[in-house]
Image (tube, helix red, strand yellow):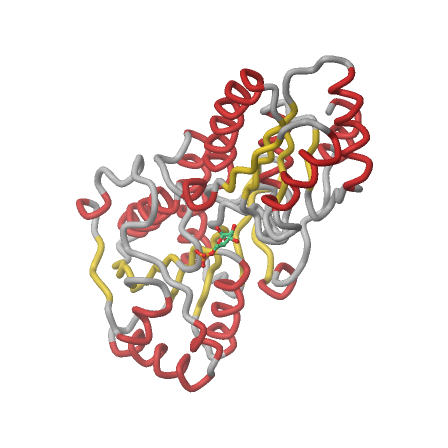
Amino acid sequence: MKIAVLTSGGDAPGMNAAIRAVVRTANVYGHEVFGIKDGFRGMIDDVMIPLNHQSVSGMLSRGGTFIGTARVPEFLDEDVRKKAIKHLRKREIEGLIVIGGDGTYKGAAELARLGLKCIGVPGTIDNDIAGTDFTIGFQTAVETIVDAIDKLRDTSQSHRRCSIIETMGRYCGDLALHAGICGGAEFIITPENPIDKEQIIERLKRHRREGRRHSIIVITERILNVYELAEEITEKSGFASRATVLGYIQRGGSPCPEDRILGSRMGAYAVELLNDDIHGVCVGVRDSRMIHLPFVNVIGQKRPRNELDKLVKKIS
Ligand code: F6P
């Protein structure tokens, strides 16, 4: 069989580990693998490279995705997708493994509807895919954020300030939640746990009276303007505040061991599924075991919340 693999949407540490596992597992079964460059863009423009054991050597520890990624809005157009499929058919490629987030899954589900054997692998730092406990890249991004919180705490406590730290996550609060817990944040604001601004200000006033030297607020992007929040807190609580938007630094870096393992397991499992002629599904990990679910059960769904949301209320 000939299999193609692509990465799409925001890059995530561990995507290379997944591609490597796809290539090496496929080789064990005698399948040929093509890497599609820059996500669905390469499928439309017919830019694909053969991948073998050697081409993925040394990739395990590399951040980003060596075959490139992109966001390709025109892939929403069915004619564009049909053209893209033709490029795969021309090379007699039967199976496609897509590594990405919800938008990527939507594209793959449409390709599956047009008859291509597609498998989804969750790769995004946001951890916002319903069919898995963890997405590839999430745990590395949490480490990066925790490192930033630790550093910001140093300067915060030196200056008796409040630090507001904005994380990525799109509409999912997991990055802020996990990193906030690890970094001992006083407040964690996420789409799932919105916090009343007045309540924060009252608590900060109290902290100030108690003589606390610093306070850390970790907040998911897109909730509010953190620079305005810093000004308001400074004005109303008397706690001088500074905002830091961590931005794209969260997406980079060498994947942590958990993401190397997750990427490897998921990439290999995706090939096993194609090998067993199972497709139209996406891979996940649930309670440490590999699972697969139909795209329709996962796309647009929210991950069930876990006990961490409740933990925050007790310990922050
Ligand atoms: O999906 C991953 C992510 O990093 C989100 O956390 C963030 O909102 C978005 O991508 C940024 O996207 P772009 O790279 O298109 O600016």
Q: Nearer the viewer, residue 302 or 268?
A: 302
Residue 167: quarter of image: top right
Query: x and y percent of residue 149 in the render?
Result: 53, 27
Instruction: Give the vertical position of 8 relative to 315 (above or below).
Output: below
Q: Nearer the viewer, residue 117 or 247?
A: 247
Residue 38: quarter of image: bottom left
- The answer to whether residue 19 is left or right of residue 130 is left
Query: x and y percent of residue 191 in the render?
Result: 70, 48
Q: Nearer the viewer, residue 293 or 187?
A: 187
Instruction: Give the vertical position of 225 relative to 300 (above or below).
Output: above
The N terminus - image quarter? bottom left
Query: x and y percent of residue 186 in the render?
Result: 69, 26
Instruction: Give the vertical position of 75 relative to 148 (above or below).
Output: below
**The residue positioned farthest toward the left in the image shown:** 54
Marks counted in the figure total: 0
**The residue positioned farthest toward the top in the image shown:** 211
Query: x and y percent of residue 287 in the render?
Result: 63, 36
- The answer to whether residue 183 is left or right of residue 121 is right
The C terminus - image quarter? top right
Q: Nearer the viewer, residue 198 or 76?
A: 198
Which residue is at 26% across, 74% downward? 46
Which residue is at 28% across, 55% downward? 67
Instruction: Give the vertical position of 70 relative to 185 (above or below).
Output: below
- The answer to whether residue 164 is left or right of residue 68 is right
